[in-house]
Image: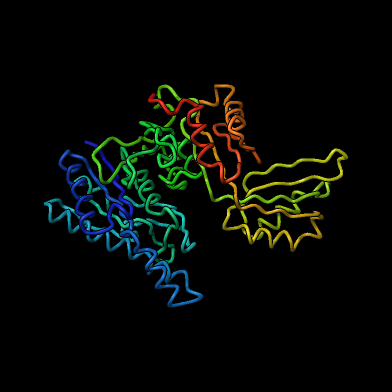
Amino acid sequence: MARIVMKFGGTSVADLDRIANAAGRVKRAVEAGDEVAVVVSAMAGVTNQLVGYVDKTSRVYDAREYDAVVASGEQVTAGLMALRLQELGVAARSWHGWQIPIRTNEVHGKARIEEIGTDNLDPRLKSGEVAVIAGFQGVSPRGRITTLGRGGSDTTAVALAAALKADRCDIYTDVDGVYTTDPRIVAKARKLERISHEEMLEMASLGAKVLQTRSVELAMNHGVRLQVLSSFEDKPGTLVVDEEEIVEQQVVSGIAYSRDEAKITLVKVADKPGVAASIFGPLADAAVNVDMIVQSVSSDGQRTDMTFTVAKTDLDRAVKTLEENRAAIEYEQLIADPDVVKISVIGVGMRSHAGVAQTMFRTLAEKGINIQVISTSEIKISTLVGEEYTELAIRALHSAYGLDTAA
């Protein structure tokens, strides 16, 4: 017997038929003798609809009331799931975040979980009752409903798994696992049986959409075993586990990409102490997050070109901020380029193998792809290239690292 948290995303509970399908999976787990807690998202499209209602009702809204409205989508799904399970003969009840309670801070719209009480859930689970929990929500110290922001239901599921000391957290979605890269681009991409938390965290933060970064980070910090599974097919998924559970690591486990990047180059900035602070300080004050950075100093040592990336959605704000601070920064020209893509190779095996970067650079050069910016960490190498080379670069790298063939 195991204790399992099963999480179903919006597409997995998009309508009553899909809720019934998900409930069937829960029933099978209960019949296998498992203790089961279920976390549900709002039905597909409902959250956007609720946000639209708020926007049409109030131009400058109270964030506390926004949370009260938007959190209702998950509550509806939780109630419907509990009813469906009862119809199937499974003991079940729904829970809102405040009833458990899932205690958060007071940052409405993007609250962070601080503590989860298990005194109410533990005896119910042990008695065989399924707890159906509304994801994405909690309760503030003042007793107000809070929402957890993007990926909030994944975060709820992982945090609950940690608090309940669950054996596993199963994330049911519209894909059947984690692949070596996007199978829509590379037909030979293959599903991974296992991937480490650290690799999954890098893949999620670098563009892979399977799991939200925040939930993977939480799982890594608390040692929660995750499993990514399809809601619609009965086939094995991908386990996300501690690195020690993977007997033999691939040098490169996967290739991720992000089209959400934009590049900014400041030409001929004065090369003097404090110049970086004069650039990145105002950007930070404007809530613009800077990612990749490269600096090239001129031969006379007097001037430098500074190139860096920001989120494409932040590009206009970043350009405006830099133009407003031009006198302090002392640059000659600002060049903005939204037509770039960040491509990253990821693998914990890089720690013990040389030549990974050289393979990447050689492969891109052979395809005539110019690398604009490079950044590295212990288990990943990222390059910025022209957006028109996205598919060519991913396919070439996937082959170069031997990911096309089954392990």
Q: Which residue is at a point 15% across and 52% down the rendered structure image?
A: 91
Q: Percent position (x, y) of residue 331? A: 80, 54
Residue closer to the observer: 335 or 1? 335
The image quadrant of residue 13 is bottom left
User: In the image, residue 281 lies at what x, y percent?
Assistant: 71, 55
Relative to 210, does residue 93 appear above or below in the rendering?
below
Residue placed at 78% from the left, 59% from the top? 326
Q: Nearer the viewer, residue 387 or 156?
A: 387
Location of the N terminus by quadrant is top left
How has the structure been colored for display?
Answer: rainbow
Q: Quadrant of residue 180?
A: top left
Q: Is residue 196 left or right of residue 40?
A: right
On the image, which quarter does residue 320 sit in?
bottom right
Could you tell whether 329 is left or right of 365 in the image? right
Labels in figure, total: 0
Quadrant the C terminus occupies: top left
Q: Return the x and y of residue 167 as percentages of the image width and height.
A: 31, 37
Q: Is residue 189 above or below residue 338?
A: above
- Frontmost residue, 171 versus 189: 189
Residue at figure coordinates x 44%, y 53% from the top left = 114
Say if 139 sits above or below 261 in the image.
below
